[in-house]
Image: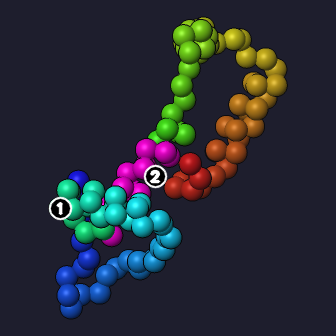
Amino acid sequence: MKAIEPPPKGRRSPTHYERLEARVTPELKELLLDAAAMRGVTLSDFLINSAHDAAVRTVDQHKLIRLNREASIQFANALLHPPRSNARLRAAARRYRQVRIRQPQGTGR
């Protein structure tokens, strides 16, 4: 795991760093210090890297859609055999195309 390094001395950082504080029990602090030493990094680097990894995992897990077997089959069937469009869907598609034609190049999505 790579430690986050401060900018070289004499150079200003292009980003602003925020300060975080946490109160922990002496036992937890000792455990964290031991873990940081085992990795060969400072306590701050260990905490930052561990928190970063946990945050990325958490966000990734919440973005991932997990489907059971039955739902997976229904989803695949919907993609492979979509229902016929109804009048409301066709009208919405027409309105969308009209709006897209009116937008200048390079704006919108």
Q: Main secondary structure of the magenta part?
A: helix
Q: Residue at x 67, y 37 (%)?
A: 97
Question: In the figure, is residue 80 to the left or right of 46?
Answer: right
Q: Residues within 10 Å of mark 1 (few under 14, many from 20)?
A: few
Residue 96 locus on image (x, y percent): 70, 38
Residue 84 vs 24, above or below: the answer is: above
Magenta segment boundaries in residue numbering: 44-59
Residue 30 locus on image (x, y percent): 34, 63
The residue to which callout 2 is attached is 55
Cα separation, mark 1 vs mark 2, equals 22 Å
Work out whether mark 1 precedes mark 2 in sequence or the reverse, and give the earlier one.
Answer: 1
- Seen as rendered, the residue at the extreme bottom is 10
Q: Residue at x 34, y 58 (%)?
A: 31
Circle number at residue 40 = 1
Q: Given the image, on which type of amino acid does mark 1 rest?
A: Gly
Do we see residue 19 in this rendering?
Answer: yes
Q: Residue at x 79, y 17 (%)?
A: 86
Label 2 residue SS: helix
Q: Residue at x 59, y 53 (%)?
A: 108
Residue 26 locus on image (x, y percent): 42, 67
In front of the other: 58 or 65 = 58
Residue 41 vs 56, above or below: the answer is: below
In front of the other: 89 or 21 = 21
Label 1 residue SS: loop
In front of the other: 64 or 91 = 64
- Seen as rendered, the residue at the extreme front is 27
Q: Is residue 37 magenta?
A: no
